[in-house]
């Protein structure tokens, strides 16, 4: 069953009409209700009258994560606060998070697009969904939760972590669908394999996203958990998970383009690339009320596929994410910017501004090591004072970035100096490789 056949399988011309109309409404909405967008449009000398069809998108200004940070917390909201019924947030490039606000209608749109995600994977009210994405400010848990309830499935809101309990409930409750990050799925798969209880599971499908993963990982997850593993994509600024999803063909993710208009631009020139070429993914939301975004630069690299899909859906597909045009890392599902770590390190007078981040994956869990130089006047053989400094930095990283890093204090001048752009990250995971 397809959740909303009318939109997912609409003719291209018909879809274009829907998009034109919704884009016009959105531009009117932000022009009149968002001082931020009104000012941006006035700067470019455009008014809503200049936007008639989606071909006019290119006239509109871009929105970036920096804009969101500058407008922290609610500066991009286009409705009064009394209409906002939910807030979510994700990491910004420095200390401040990026905040998203949803009206009741936005939440309903969200649960609809996630419902499409799940029905495209063959799920229905007969499924038992184990939601092992984190609940809270992160959009994964609650996003998947309401989508699964929307299709009438039984939902286990277990959130992330607590592997033993996950496996126990998975067996006792007979979960049939699993939602979590792909790395956690692999971790669970390994634990299940070690326990030798694969045969006791009723799992048949999984919806994994929030971080990059390769085809090789997909095969391993599918084998270890004996399921079909689907890639799902989204970002807080646009709505959360539910922006795009794979169908059974697993040949790219169908974009819910009746809600989110995609473009691909060259991240250097900011010009649209030729059809089918790789570039930076940009989204304009065309139905959101609370916090619509116009030409939001995701910094994710991919390409669009307009050819018909064997599943029958006519919506445009995006290729698996192929990289980032900035330096954001996703570690254990958490978005981490090297600049965030740098600002934490700079809070400590004892450390020098020379550091290197190492990311790797061991036993399907990301490892994150931060090497930082201690200033010569603070470097000492006194192990307890060094241990104390290390612990304080680790606690601060945990509280600001929301992730545990193993800090290693290294001798003054031991981190390689660069003569050009500093190379501060070594990521051995190769997650964007096919
Ligand atoms: O990660 C929303 C989400 C939750 C998506 C659960 C899928 C499942 P943010 O925390 O704002 O939102 O992070 C968004 O994560 O710009 C991508 O770089 C990355 N990302 C999300 N899904 C995928 C995916 C959620 N399937 C950022 N493949 C995005 C690769 C992904 N990267």
Image: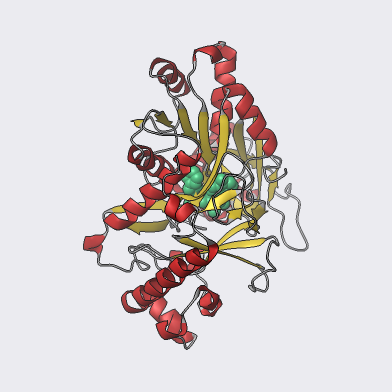
Front residue of 110/356: it is 110
Q: Is residue 339 above or below residue 296?
A: above
Identify the residue at horizontal 49%, vertical 12% (top origin).
200
Give the percent coordinates (x, y) of residue 323: 66, 52
Which of the 4 image quadrants contains residue 217?
top right
Q: In the image as oriented, which residue stretches furthest toward the left? A: 82
Give the percent coordinates (x, y) of residue 111: 36, 47
**In this image, 68 relative to 216: left or right?**
left
The number of numbered badges drawn on the structure is 0
Q: Is residue 298 above or below residue 219?
A: below
Quadrant in which the N terminus is drawn: top left
Question: Can the viewer see residue 336?
Answer: no
**In this image, 281 relative to 430: left or right?**
left
Quadrant in which the C terminus is drawn: top right
Front residue of 312/396: it is 312
Question: Can the viewer see residue 183?
Answer: yes
Identify the residue at horizontal 43%, vertical 16% (top origin).
168
Identify the residue at horizontal 61%, vertical 44% (top origin).
212
């Amino acid at each position: 069953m397809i959740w909303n056949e009318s939109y997912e399988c609409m003719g291209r011309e018909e879809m274009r009409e829907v998009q034109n109309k919704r884009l016009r409404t959105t531009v009117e909405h932000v022009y009149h209700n968002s001082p931020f967008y009104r000012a941006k449009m006035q700067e470019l000398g455009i008014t809503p009258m200049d936007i008639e069809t989606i071909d006019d998108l290119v006239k509109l200004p871009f929105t970036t994560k920096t804009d969101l940070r500058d407008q922290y917390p609610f500066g991009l909201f286009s409705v009064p606060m009394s209409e906002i019924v939910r807030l979510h947030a994700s990491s910004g490039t420095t200390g401040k998070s990026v905040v998203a606000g949803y009206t009741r209608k936005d939440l309903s749109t969200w649960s609809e697009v996630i419902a499409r995600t799940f029905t495209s994977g063959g799920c229905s009210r007969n499924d038992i969904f184990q939601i092992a994405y984190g609940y809270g400010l992160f959009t994964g848990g609650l996003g998947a939760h309401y989508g699964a309830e929307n299709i009438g499935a039984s939902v286990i809101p277990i959130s992330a972590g607590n592997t033993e309990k996950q496996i126990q409930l998975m067996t006792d409750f007979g979960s049939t669908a699993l939602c979590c990050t792909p790395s956690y799925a692999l971790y669970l798969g390994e634990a299940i394999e070690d326990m030798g209880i694969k045969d006791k599971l009723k799992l048949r499908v999984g919806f994994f996203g929030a971080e990059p993963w390769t085809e090789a990982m997909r095969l391993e997850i599918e084998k270890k958990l004996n399921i079909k593993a689907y890639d799902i994509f989204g970002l807080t600024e646009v709505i959360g998970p539910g922006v795009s999803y794979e169908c059974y063909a697993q040949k790219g993710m169908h974009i819910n383009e009746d809600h989110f208009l995609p473009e691909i631009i060259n991240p250097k020139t900011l010009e649209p690339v030729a059809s089918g070429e790789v570039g930076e993914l940009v989204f304009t939301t065309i139905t959101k009320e609370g916090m619509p975004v116009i030409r939001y630069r995701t910094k994710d690299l991919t390409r669009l596929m307009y050819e018909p899909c064997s599943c029958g859906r006519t919506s445009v597909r995006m290729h698996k994410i192929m990289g980032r045009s900035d330096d954001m890392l996703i570690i254990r599902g958490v978005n981490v910017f090297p600049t965030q770590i740098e600002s934490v390190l700079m809070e400590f007078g004892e450390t020098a501004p020379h550091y290197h981040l190492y990311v790797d994956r061991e036993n399907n869990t990301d490892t994150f090591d931060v090497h930082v130089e201690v200033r010569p006047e603070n470097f000492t053989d006194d192990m307890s004072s060094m241990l104390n400094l290390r612990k304080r930095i680790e606690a601060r990283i945990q509280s600001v970035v929301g992730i545990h890093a193993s800090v290693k204090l290294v001798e003054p001048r031991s981190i390689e100096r660069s003569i050009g752009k500093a190379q501060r990250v070594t990521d051995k995971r190769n997650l964007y490789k096919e």
